[in-house]
């Protein structure tokens, strides 16, 4: 049995996903509480299902489950799901950067440093230590990165579709 210790870089990669997931789940739970307070519903199962299908409260939580599931899988699929989160984060920052009008208050500098973070995490995910944990060969890295960019683009398309159909 050739088990090796999980490198610290693998743990560092997972921490932002867990923190962001917890923050999103808390925000969505608070939004659900506010929704029930405003509508006066009695928090029954049918009311919860109605909230899921008719409002946008849990949409980000469902999308955040994708990389969160990847954290618990020590396989190539787990690696893809985690890396797709960082690619989605990168694409979202790029979109925000092109949409924002920069002022003299340092917005471009802040955006630049926020832009560098997912690139660093993507580089760490492609590190040899992390690819060994997920049993990925160096020859497979390009295909795996393209697959994870594709997953991120599919997530982005889902976000755009859900925003267009939001009531």
Image: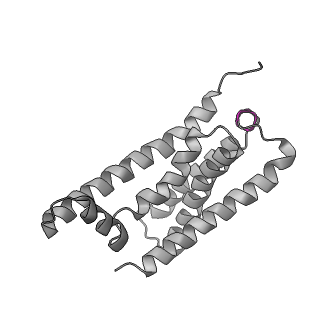
Q: Residue furthest top?
A: 1
Q: Quadrant of residue 2?
A: top right
Q: Position of residue 42 (x, y in %)?
A: 15, 61
Q: Quadrant of residue 124?
A: top right
Q: Position of residue 122 (x, y in %)?
A: 66, 48
On-image quarter of the C terminus:
bottom left
The foreground one among 83 and 78 is: 78
Give the residue displayed 50% in from the left and 75% down from the top.
Answer: 160
Give the residue displayed 19% in from the left and 61% down from the top.
Answer: 34
Give the residue displayed 33% in from the left and 73% down from the top.
Answer: 54
Q: Position of residue 16 (x, y in %)?
A: 49, 43
What secondary structure prevails in the magenta region?
helix
Q: Quadrant of residue 105?
A: bottom left
Q: Is residue 11 magenta?
A: no
Scheme of image coloration: one colour
The foreground one among 113 and 77 is: 77
What range is drawn magenta here? 129-133
Residue 89 visible to the viewer: yes
On-image quarter of the N terminus:
top right
Residue 110 visible to the viewer: no
Q: Position of residue 38 (x, y in %)?
A: 14, 67
The image shows a total of numbered marks equal to 0
Q: Is residue 156 above or below residue 27?
A: below
Q: Is residue 132 above or below residue 80?
A: above
Give the residue displayed 42% in from the left and 57% down from the top.
Answer: 61
């Amino acid at each position: 049995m050739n088990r090796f210790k999980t490198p610290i870089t693998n743990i560092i990669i997972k921490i932002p996903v867990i923190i962001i997931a917890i923050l999103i789940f808390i925000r969505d739970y608070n939004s659900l509480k506010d929704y029930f307070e405003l509508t006066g519903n009695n928090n029954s199962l049918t009311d919860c299902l109605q909230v899921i299908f008719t409002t946008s409260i849990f949409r980000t939580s469902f999308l955040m489950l994708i990389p969160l599931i990847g954290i618990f899988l020590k396989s190539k699929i787990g690696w893809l799901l985690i890396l797709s989160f960082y690619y989605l984060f990168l694409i979202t920052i790029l979109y925000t950067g092109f949409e924002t009008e920069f002022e003299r208050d340092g917005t471009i500098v802040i955006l630049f440093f926020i832009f560098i973070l997912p690139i660093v995490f993507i580089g760490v995910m492609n590190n040899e230590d992390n690819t060994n944990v997920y049993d990925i060969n160096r020859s497979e890295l390009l295909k795996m990165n393209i697959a994870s960019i594709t997953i991120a683009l599919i997530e982005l398309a889902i976000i755009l579709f859900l925003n267009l159909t939001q009531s």
